[in-house]
Image: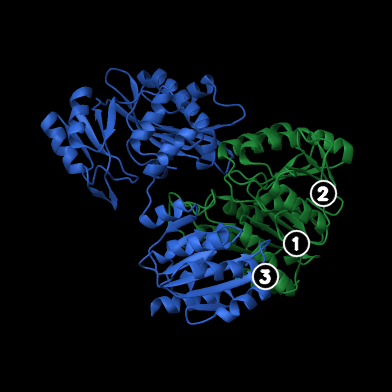
């Protein structure tokens, strides 16, 4: 099995008519994802490479039975797009867009929690998720992931997610689902949400978790792992040598006031029984070792 | 995007928060004119992006024009922890009865806004948090609901300020919350928030950090770009639109993706080297971006070797390899390059690089071996 996404998930692409949305919409479709519709308020009735465009998510869902959307809309429109998808009853909303203001993220995160608890938001500023061999929603290169299992991946960083998939593929290890939660200050889906889903998924036997400096999401995940996870985990945290107070590209990757350092996160994870690698390759090797022992 | 104190005060003033009358300048005589206008005594304050200004002699009280001139002249050009003072702020000095602390920021863990208020102001809030956490009254605010005046009142009462300050503090905090939300700030901090002997509450300092992702909603924020603390390398990179942070080492680093770039710094350190920079060129890795990145790194006198670490996802290895070759033909480099190319079509990409390999362009199979090679070259 996989988590959050499989071959039966029908997905609407908000922003399919834009160049990025069209490019990845088509790639995802080629991979096998059920890309059933796009939306654009003024282009209803047209199509993008054969994929029909509807005026709204609600209309697209009504017509196609879709339960998920993927957002490729510029940052200024993201809040509206997320709330529209949630109001239309989407179970999964994957927001790829980067550069969304943190105040907007905090607003729609809490709005969803209060009014649309049935909607899972992934992102913003994330690569999306892939259940290898079944479906791929977002910008991950599908061919670097080996289908099957037994490993589930959850990651805060885009390229390191790909690196992790690739390390496992090189070792001939399959992946049930790989979830990129994104590095922004208020991610819709947390490490803990994914860990919980992987713990419940019978096909996932082990989890690889990739974090980075800033915030306290890894420390919270460590606490959860200690109390709730029975499956073995390997991990890597990027940014051991990042200087304090400097933004490292991501909104999330900043250390301030001695909090959120890589070493504090690594310690917390090790304390929770996680096997922590010093670099992505080592984390991959640790996972190979874990898988060999399953 | 961190604002200087005077920018923060002007930002606060637009939301009706009382700040001291003052002006910023880079000129000594103009500073005296400002002092004459706002009335003595005045405070002359260095405007730099670092703490510890007072200890470094960057904050001085002047009773008259001669003193104002002397302080302005001494402070302009002063080096405070590597930051040269180009701007000073001259304001009318305030009488202080009590000093408080107030701020709003995002609590990433609670995913709500966090307001902090303390009767123990004027010192680092981290110190108060450590030594006397009960002295900080905290309030979590759901962004959907906002901050009501009743909540604000209860919060102010919990902070045990002087009762004289209650109404003034509520007024300022409500305005500060509006400034924080409408201004798309990451942080709005007043330390100290003062109670004057006359009973008024007043923002004596301003620490504001704005969310650079929200610039499209606030075109006026472009003015703050000019005063961001950047060294020459960072300025050059910023002009090219690169995600670059200058560091002190000798291995220039280019990687795609923030996570991989951070990871590359880590690996360089692990093998005993020291990175000269963080540089994320994003997903594309085309020749233009690569050439710009190489130019910035080549201009860094400390760089002795360059480590290019690319993982091809959607971007294919051959595109990356062609981009590198093309960029190298455009930029005359002083340092040798070590490349690690992995991911999608890595084999094809490596095949393209192979005929170009020399003692100026080397290729390694893994991140670790490439880092080791680059560090070895940098050490020679």
Q: Nearer the viewer, residue B204 or B324?
A: B324
Residue A199 position (above or below residue B158)? below
- Which circle, 1 or 3, is nearer the viewer? 1
Quadrant in the picture for the N terminus of chain B: top left
- The chain whose colour is green is A
**Residue position marked by numbered label 2 in the rendering:** A49
Using the rendered image, report if marks 1 and 2 lie on a common chain.
yes
- Residue A73 image point, x, y percent: 68, 42
Quote the CA–CA distance across marks 1 and 2.
20 Å
Please state if B76 lies on the left or on the right of A207 as rendered.
left
Q: Which chain is blue?
A: B
First in residue order: circle 1 vs circle 3: 1
Chain letter for mark 3: A
Residue closer to the observer: B25 or A210: B25
Q: Secondary structure at mark 3?
A: helix
Q: Which mark is residue A142?
A: 1
Q: Residue at x 57, y 45 (%)?
A: A185
- Whether tag 1 and tag 2 are in contact, CB under 8 A, the answer is no
Q: Quadrant of the C terminus of chain B?
A: bottom left
Q: Is residue A103 visible?
A: yes
């Amino acid at each position: 099995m996989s988590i959050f996404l499989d071959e039966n998930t029908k997905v609407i692409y908000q922003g399919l008519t834009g160049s990025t949305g069209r490019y990845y919409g088509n790639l995802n479709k080629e991979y096998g994802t059920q890309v059933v519709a796009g939306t654009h308020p003024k282009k209803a009735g047209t199509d993008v490479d054969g994929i029909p465009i509807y005026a709204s998510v609600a209309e697209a869902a009504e017509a196609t039975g879709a339960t998920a959307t993927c957002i490729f809309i510029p940052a200024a429109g993201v809040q509206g797009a997320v709330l529209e998808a949630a109001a239309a009853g989407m179970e999964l909303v994957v927001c790829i867009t980067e550069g969304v203001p943190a105040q907007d993220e905090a607003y729609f995160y809490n709005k969803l929690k209060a009014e649309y608890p049935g909607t899972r938001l992934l992102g913003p500023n994330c690569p999306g998720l892939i259940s290898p061999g079944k479906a791929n929603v977002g910008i991950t290169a599908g061919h670097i992931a080996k289908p099957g299992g037994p490993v589930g991946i959850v990651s805060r960083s885009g390229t390191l997610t790909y690196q992790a998939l690739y390390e496992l593929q090189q070792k001939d290890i399959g992946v049930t689902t790989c979830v990129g939660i994104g590095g922004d200050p208020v991610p819709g889906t947390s490490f803990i949400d994914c860990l919980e889903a992987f713990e419940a998924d019978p096909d996932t036997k082990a989890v690889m978790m990739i974090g980075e400096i800033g915030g306290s999401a890894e420390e919270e995940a460590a606490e959860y792992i200690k109390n709730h996870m029975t499956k073995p985990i390997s991990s890597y945290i990027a940014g051991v040598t990042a200087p304090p107070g400097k933004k490292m590209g991501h909104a999330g990757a900043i250390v301030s006031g001695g909090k959120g350092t890589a070493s504090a996160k690594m310690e917390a994870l090790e304390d929770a029984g996680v096997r922590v690698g010093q670099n992505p390759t080592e984390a991959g090797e640790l996972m190979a070792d874990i898988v060999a022992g399953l | 995007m961190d604002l200087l104190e005077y920018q923060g005060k002007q930002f606060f003033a637009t939301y009706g928060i009382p700040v001291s009358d003052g002006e910023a300048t880079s000129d000594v005589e103009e500073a005296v004119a400002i002092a004459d206008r706002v009335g003595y005594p005045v405070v002359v304050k260095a405007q730099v992006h670092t703490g510890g200004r007072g200890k470094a002699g960057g904050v001085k009280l002047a009773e008259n024009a001669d003193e104002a001139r002397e302080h302005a002249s001494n402070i302009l050009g002063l080096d405070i922890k590597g930051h040269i003072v180009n701007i000073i702020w001259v304001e009318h000095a305030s009488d202080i009865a009590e000093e408080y602390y107030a701020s709003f920021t995002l609590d990433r863990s609670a995913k709500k806004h966090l307001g902090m208020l303390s009767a123990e102001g004027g010192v680092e809030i981290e110190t108060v948090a450590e030594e006397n956490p009960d002295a900080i009254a905290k309030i979590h605010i759901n962004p959907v609901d906002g901050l009501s005046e009743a909540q604000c009142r209860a919060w102010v009462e919990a902070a045990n300020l002087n009762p004289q300050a209650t109404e003034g503090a509520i007024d300022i905090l409500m305005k500060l919350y509006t400034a924080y939300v409408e201004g798309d700030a990451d942080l709005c901090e007043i330390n100290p928030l003062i109670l004057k002997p006359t009973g008024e509450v007043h923002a004596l300092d301003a620490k504001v950090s704005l969310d650079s992702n929200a610039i499209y909603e606030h075109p006026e924020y472009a003015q703050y770009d000019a005063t961001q603390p950047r060294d020459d390398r960072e300025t050059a990179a910023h002009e090219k639109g690169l995600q670059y942070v200058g560091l002190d080492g000798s291995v220039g680093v280019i990687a795609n993706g923030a996570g991989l770039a951070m990871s590359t710094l880590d690996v360089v350190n692990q093998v005993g080297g020291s990175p000269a920079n963080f540089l994320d060129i994003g997903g594309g890795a085309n020749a233009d971006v690569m050439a710009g990145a190489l130019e910035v790194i080549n201009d860094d006198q400390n760089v002795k070797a360059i480590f290019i670490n690319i993982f091809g996802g959607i971007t294919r290895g051959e595109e990356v390899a062609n981009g590198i070759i093309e960029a190298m033909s455009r930029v005359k480099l002083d340092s040798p390059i070590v490349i690690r190319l992995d991911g999608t079509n890595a084999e094809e990409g490596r095949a393209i690089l192979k005929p170009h390999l020399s003692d100026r362009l080397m290729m390694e199979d893994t991140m670790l071996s490439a880092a080791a090679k680059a560090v070895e070259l940098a050490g020679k």
